[in-house]
Amino acid sequence: MPAKELPPIAHAIAGAAGGAFATWLFYPLELIRVEMQKNPQPSSSSSSRHDNDEDDDGDAPPPETNLECLIRLYKKQALYRGASSMVITMLISSYITFFALESIRRSMASLKHQAASSYNRQQQTRQIHRLQKHIQFLNYMLPKSKMSSSLLASTLTGIINVFLTTPLWNGTRRIMESDPQPIQQEPVLSCTANNSNNEEQQHIMKAQHYKPEPNLWEMMHTIATEEGVLQLWHGTVSSLLLVSNPAIQYFLYEQIRVWVLGVKNRRSSGGGGGGGDRAQSLQLTAMEAFLFGALSKTVATVVTYPLQLGQVLIRLRKNEVKEAMEQQADSSPTNTASIEEYNGMADCLYQQFTRGGFSSLFQGMSSKLVQTVGQASFIFVTYEQMLAVVANFIEPR
């Protein structure tokens, strides 16, 4: 059975497996990014620090590099802190994405075919006439080209995914950004000898014990009970702006995939190969899936990176304003008066551009590309391989 004829659930299972595996593999890089954003350094070029660098001290600690952050997390055995929540979220999100994407594509193709076949029919019944008008309307509304249909399907898939998985991502983000909470500190006595007086001095050492991190469902329940159910969908508007990223990614990957498989199919049929060779030609190799996934994610990241940067800067600025308001009673208000929230995404990007020029809209993109492009590549590699495995189960040879 060709891959394109597999049911949507087959694509969903393959995509979910790829998303979960790639997320687990690249999770330390994602955690490092969260740690660096959570603890910004005074020397950072982030826009949230430009307002306060006039009174910086000369003895400020140097900024922590990605390697230093990696070593620190490794020593604390925290490289995979919160990984289970992220893997579960990505598993569900990938399943929804691939299932919805394939279902929407099939539905749009079916509607267009139905509209084309029904447009020329001459029906006299009133109900058929109403149905015909409805189908004609869909025929005008739906894109005429396959590329436009694919892009529309990817966009609709992204919108559906945002509304269904935003609570999962908010819960996962809270777990990743939270620090381990210590509980009872058991005193441990240790004796050291004093060389001058030959007296033993007792020192009390405290063994740190931390509370186990909450799982994803506990964190979502905590947010809903303490902050309200609507808080689970906090950031939905900004996430909808970033729907363009996966839309471009899946659109480009699908166009390249269809083109390559078409070339393989024509070569196989033209060369007079057997049925086994033709079936094999309808599947991308691991290297092809890796390269096409990397290419599509690179283009999507470069095109939409200013929006991603703006989303991060807005969240960091809100956290700074909140901390400044909490410290306003203990410190002079003149230190916090200059910190104001951005007035939306456009204001954030405009201020970033006026401070650092066009290149500042892409600050930190290199490290983002390493994590997202590598992860997307492994998602599509696993997806293509799992798709072949699922096809064998659905229709064994």
Image (cartoon, helix red, strand yellow):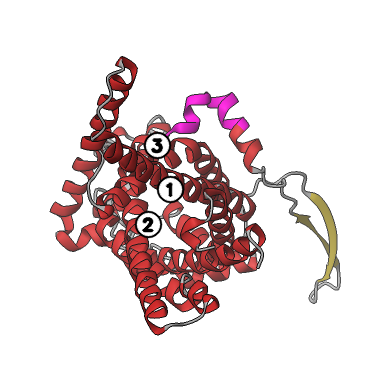
| Res. 211 visible in picture | yes
Residue assigned mark 3: 235
- Which residue occupies the foreground of this view, 374 or 159? 159
Q: Is residue 149 depicted above or below 278 in this figure? A: above
Q: Position of residue 1 (x, y in %)?
A: 54, 62
Query: What kind of residue is marked 2?
Result: Tyr
Query: What kind of residue is marked 3?
Result: Gly
- Which residue occupies the foreground of this view, 333 or 316? 316
- Magenta stretch secondary structure, dominant: helix
- Which residue occupies the foreground of this view, 145 or 39? 145
Residue assigned mark 2: 250
Frontmost of labels 2 and 3 is 2
Which residue is rendered at x = 37% and y = 80% of the image? Answer: 270
Q: Is residue 285 depicted above or below 184 in this figure? A: below
Q: Position of residue 317 (x, y in %)?
A: 33, 43
Residue assigned mark 1: 101
The answer to whether 137 appears left or right of 322 in the picture is left
Crowd class of label 2 (few under 14; some 14 to 19; many from 20; radius 10 Å): many
Which residue is rendered at x = 49% and y = 56% of the image? Answer: 5
Residue 225 belongs to the span the image colors magenta: yes
Query: What kind of residue is marked 1?
Result: Leu
